[in-house]
Image: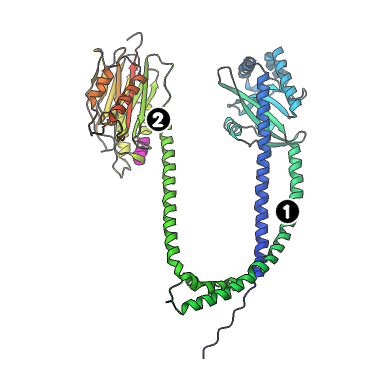
Amino acid sequence: MKKPKQKKKKRSLQRVAVYSTLIGAFLFLLILSVVELVLHVYAIMGNYKAEAKHEGSFVMSLIDPAYVERIFAETKANYASIPEELRQQQFTDAYRERCAVVIDEDFFTAREILVKCREETGMRNIQMEFYDPENDRMVVVLDGDEPDYAYIPGQWLSDEGAGVIENPKQIAYIMNSDWYMPVGYGAVSGWTATDYMEITDTQGNPIGYLVMNIDINEFSIRLRSFLIVYIPTLIGVLVLAAFWIARRLRKRIVDPVNQLAVAARNYTRRDKAVETPKESYFADLQIDTGDEIEELWESMTDMERDMTKTLSRVRVVTAERERLRQERVRIVAELDIARDIQQAAIPSTFPAFPERKEFDLYAAMTPAKEVGGDFYDFFLLDADHLAIAIADVAGKGIPAALFMMISKQTLRNHALHGGTPSEVLSYVNDHLCENNPNEMFVTIWFGILTISTGEIIACSAGHEYPAILTDTGKYVLFEEPHGLACGAMPGMPYEDYTFRLPKGGRILVYTDGVVEAHNEKDELLGFEEIVNELNKGEDAAPRETVERILKRIQEFAGACEQFDDITLLNLWYKGTESV
């Protein structure tokens, strides 16, 4: 005989509600307290910082900028001239005498301004300082502290004697933050926060910092008082609220749920008499809570069966749409980051070598997608040799961009170690062939200009022929020997060739996206059109030449979508007196 199933003892939903409310109140208290504290500190420190920036700007407006630039320059020069052995004894009379040479009447006038601003604003101190990277010190230029504690120009602060000293990277973070300031505690001054403001010379170049030590003792006292009163009060209120909610739960939820369970059971039994029962989504859950919720589940199971398939389809469709949306957002964000990284790796400051009058150059790259596979590079190997490179990776998008970054860095690193262009490309080829499962390759033109003579030794790994402006006054195509593209096959030989640019000569190197630009009729622009455009302004500066060609490409393509990356580099050899 089968043993009858023992009736399970059920727990009261009211008891569960009381325990859940108490736990929830505790967690809510903890989270609310932390959030309140963070927001409170953020707001107060933000106010301190905003006030400090305002007061710092006011201080700088009172002091003559020309004097600020002069006292910084004189203090830096004087500090640099003092031996380190004497610097270590900065509080001795000998060191003070060496530092006092920069003190004049203008110094006392400027210091008086700092002192008055400190006294009027209630700050702990205001100083002008600059960073000594060699010894990790902040060197004082002007100090607005009380006379007994004030530093003279050239005395310094370090981690050993003044607590933590921020370096320029940390100072930049502090200046850019809306609220963050390092906080310290001193036996005399109590709690202080430190903010910085950059000081520049009359040309806008940074020369040091205005350091403001802000007294936050009042804030610390208020914060302590706030926590002492707020937390116990909040605990008491939440505990009382928890018990009140528990009592209301019985009256407003528990009893109505029991009534709903009886009504729902009767409704489902009546429906079963006329409808064919279907599988229920809730029946498979087998809820076993042992309280009134279980009874509600038992009553509602049949009523929810007809909604199961519809809800399931809605969930699947919604989840898929959300997944696709998040995937699109992720891809867009990653492409933006990749574009920024790639653009940062390509030289973009022009004029690139303003101090060199023997030559001028300009380059531009327009990727067909968010990131591209083209690159250009230029750098001085020494005072008389300029390296120039342009390359085109087979393919587009992220794979080509990654391969491009590897190719560019490999070429630059090896070129800086010396060697002819053919030796450099041989090394790049062998390096790229290693661990190249996707069999990617890149065409490269690499040349080295001897600045004193105009001679260029170059090598091409399957790249487009350069266009050269020679003594004839016209650009012509220079058909030099070609090697195999780098990354295609290891151990391939490459051949150097040499030509000379006369004084005023020019060279244009480019990728195939320039000559293969197409319009809506699927016609190619072609090299002849590029040469014609070059010869219309053979005396133009490199920037003007590159921009004119890009404009011609855009006019030719019209509304047609760009198919390939477009990259150009134009070099103008002005020559030297000996050429």
- Asked whether 405 falls inside the magenta stretch, the response is yes
The amino acid at mark 1 is Leu
Residue 229 in the image, given as x and y percentages of width and height: 77, 49
Apparent side of residue 172 relative to residue 348 in the rendered image (left or right): right
- Mark 1: secondary structure: helix
> To which residue does mark 1 refer?
234
- What label does residue 128 carry, if any? none
- Seen at 26% across and 17% down, the residue is 535
Q: Could you tell me how far apart the alpha carbons at marks 1 and 2 are, in whole angstroms? A: 58 Å
Q: Which residue is mark 2?
A: 346
Give the mark nearer the N terminus: 1 vs 2: 1
Judge whether residue 104 can be spotted in this image.
no
In this view, the residue in front, 558 or 463, is 558
- Identified by mark 2, the residue type is Ile
Q: Position of residue 566 (x, y in %)?
A: 32, 30
- Give the magenta range: 398-406
Q: Quadrant of residue 426?
A: top left
Asked whether residue 570 is drawn in magenta, I would say no
Confirm whether residue 240 shows in the render: yes
Q: How many marks?
A: 2
Residue that appears at 67% across and 23% down = 58
Q: Quadrant of residue 246?
A: bottom right
Up the image or down, 4 lies above or below 572; here it is below
